[in-house]
Amino acid sequence: MADATTLLLAWRQGDEAALEQLIPLVYQALRRMAHRYMAGQRAGHTLQTTALVHETYLQLVDYRQVRWQDRSHFLAVSATLMRRILVDYARSRKAGKRGGAERPVSLDENLTFSPAMSANLVALDDALQALGEIDPRKSKVVELKFFGGLDTREIAATLGVSEPTVLRDWKLAKVWLLREVTRT
């Protein structure tokens, strides 16, 4: 997405040709993001990577009025949308299986999940929302890193803070989230 920032800005200013060039870049970025999320799902999962990408893309089209700042901003918005889609899907699956046992979430450096990611994703989302009420920046760091796939430098630029601040927020947020999702 090297030219994505330029294309996003041109599209925002009404250049429809920029949109034509942007679509393949956007699709590739969304596909990588979705593939990363779906890799932790169980075999035979009913939500496929392509469906997740298409649903996210359809919702992004409604964001035409967003004043895209750069590639990081686009990925942050995409990550938020993808997170909402995944959590809504997980909640609907969980609602159909009332009383199902949840498995613990593993919050290692990559925030990987066990095969029961649907239930864990709901627990993580609930904890992330609670963290957002206490410390919105730490919540946003987790969202950008885990759901957006942004690196420390990109997160720092997006949030307007230093890289050490992002690393500190990431470490504290992981500990806080682990405590929240493992409460019985």
Image: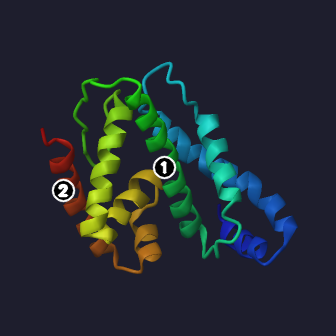
Q: Which residue appears farthest toward the right when viewing the image?
A: 17
> 8 or 183: which is nearer to us?
183
Kind of residue indicated by mark 2:
Trp
Give the quarter of the figure containing the N terminus: bottom right
Quadrant of the rendered image containing residue 105 = top left
Q: Does 167 appear above or below 161?
A: above
Which residue is painted at 56% across and 57% down in the image?
78
- For the residue carrying disc 2, how many other residues have a C-alpha within 10 Å: few (<14), some (14-19), or many (20+)? some
Quadrant of the rendered image containing residue 131 = bottom left
- For mark 1, give the secondary structure: helix
Locate residue 127, reporting x and y percent. 27, 52
> 114 or 109: which is nearer to us?
114
Locate residue 46, reporting x and y percent. 54, 24
- For the residue carrying disc 1, how many other residues have a C-alpha within 10 Å: few (<14), some (14-19), or many (20+)? some
Q: Is residue 52 left or right of residue 36?
A: right
Which residue is painted at 33% across and 34% down in the image?
119
> Which mark's residue is nearer the viewer, 2 or 1?
1
Mark 2 and 1 residues: CB-CB less than 8 Å, in contact?
no
Specify the label residue 176 is tagged with.
2
> 152 or 172: which is nearer to us?
172
Q: Which residue appears farthest toward the left when viewing the image?
A: 184
Q: Does 91 appear above or below 139?
A: above
Q: Is residue 65 left or right of residue 37?
A: right
Give the quarter of the figure containing the C terminus: top left
Locate residue 91, reporting x and y percent. 41, 37
Q: Residue under label 1, please give it.
A: 84
Res 10 visible: yes
Kind of residue indicated by mark 1:
Arg
Q: Does 130 appear above or below 117?
A: below
